[in-house]
Image (spheres, rainbow, N blue to C red):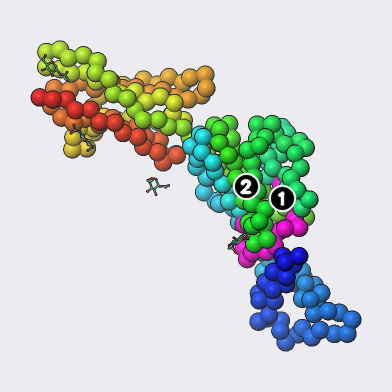
Amino acid sequence: MTWETTTEHQNEKRKSSMLQPKIQPSDGLSFRTCTVFIFMVLQSVGEPSQLICSHQPIVALAGDDVILSCHFEPAINARSQTVIWTRTDLNPKYIHYHNPGGMVDLDQNPSYHYRTRLFVDELKNGTVSMKIFRVKLSDAGKYECSLPLMKMYVSIQLTVGAVSAPVIEFVSNQSREVVLQCEAKGWYPEPELFWLDGEGNLLSAGPTETVRGPDDLYTVSRRLTVRKSDNFTCRVQQKNINQTRETHFYVPG
Ligand SMILES: *[C@@H]1O[C@H](CO)[C@@H](O)[C@H](O)[C@H]1NC(C)=O
Ligand SMILES: *[C@@H]1O[C@H](CO)[C@@H](O)[C@H](O)[C@H]1NC(C)=O
Ligand SMILES: *[C@@H]1O[C@H](CO)[C@@H](O)[C@H](O)[C@H]1NC(C)=O
Ligand SMILES: *[C@@H]1O[C@H](CO)[C@@H](O)[C@H](O)[C@H]1NC(C)=O
């Protein structure tokens, strides 16, 4: 039971400066019980440990693994806690249910089967983060991390995007005018598409055509007419997921 030793040690370290003069192990009450008791009182009265989750939305790309990070500050041992991750917009709402006896599969939302993990070895130093493997677009949303025994509930937002490199095609070459088309498939959310010249200046181009597929992904395309030789760039970007992809096309003189 090494973790109990750790708790005791941490408690002593945290509170010793404040409490040392008052704690006198008395008859029939071990120093350890006393320390734990005082610690629990301080937990409820004094500056309590807070459950902190990332305030910024966590951004992941479809197919990535992602960690929704939550931890206690100051650190406490959460090994004896039930830790429940839910999404209240889903039914069943349970994404990961951890009790000290191990994970309970019952009622887990089927979309998350075999895709979640809690860092069990790090519960003892106050980490209750959840990892989601092979993120899907449908995983985007508001998650809640709760420790019901401590009456703690904190939410955290996951944003999921999808990207791919744009492809430039040569459309036509007539009377010194070359028409190029840039197309980017499989983006989410809807991205912006720009054409730039060799010096990075934005060029005026045709309208952006946007198509949304049955999988919710966007395909965007845009044509550019050029009259001189240059190294042209098609840039596709999505600010909400902070992603940019570029492809170059050299038009000779
Ligand atoms: C938390 O626990 C893990 C596993 O024992 C350990 O590797 C890690 O260093 C600890 N982290 C902190 C901040 O103490
Ligand atoms: C367009 O046509 C001209 C003349 O036929 C040729 O020299 C030039 O390489 C062509 N440009 C491209 C991009 O194919
Ligand atoms: C966006 O991505 C760039 C490059 O990957 C990175 O340097 C920058 O810190 C990111 N910005 C935000 C707000 O995440
Ligand atoms: C076009 O520009 C890109 C980026 O500056 C560069 O990597 C690429 O080699 C250039 N292509 C040509 C044909 O000059």
Which residue is rendered at x = 71% and y = 50% of the image?
Answer: 83
> In the displayed structure, does residue 209 sit left or right of residue 17?
left
Q: Position of residue 192 (x, y in %)?
A: 36, 31
Relative height, residue 37 to residue 230 (above, below): below
Tell me the magenta residue range. 71-84
Number of numbered labels in the structure image: 2
**Seen from this angle, which residue lies furthest front?**
1
Which residue is rendered at x = 29% and y = 31% of the image?
Answer: 247
The quadrant the N terminus occupies is bottom right
User: Amino acid under label 1?
Assistant: Val
Question: In terms of depth relative to the viewer, which is nearer, 38 or 65?
Answer: 65
> In the displayed structure, does residue 235 sit left or right of residue 104?
left
Give neighbour class at mark 1: few <14, some 14-19, many 20+ (Cα, 10 Å).
many
Give neighbour class at mark 2: few <14, some 14-19, many 20+ (Cα, 10 Å).
many
Q: Secondary structure at mark 2?
A: strand
User: Amino acid under label 2?
Assistant: Met
Q: Is 83 included in the stretch rendered in magenta?
A: yes
Which residue position is annotated with label 2?
130
Q: Position of residue 109 (x, y in %)?
A: 70, 34
Which residue position is annotated with label 1?
83
Q: Quadrant of residue 244?
A: top left
* Disc number for residue 28: none
Q: Quadrant of residue 208?
A: top left
In three-dimensional space, the C-alpha distance between marks 1 and 2, rounded to whole angstroms, equals 10 Å
Q: Quadrant of residue 172?
A: top left
Main secondary structure of the magenta stretch: loop
Q: Position of residue 144 (x, y in %)?
A: 66, 45
Q: Is residue 151 visible?
A: no
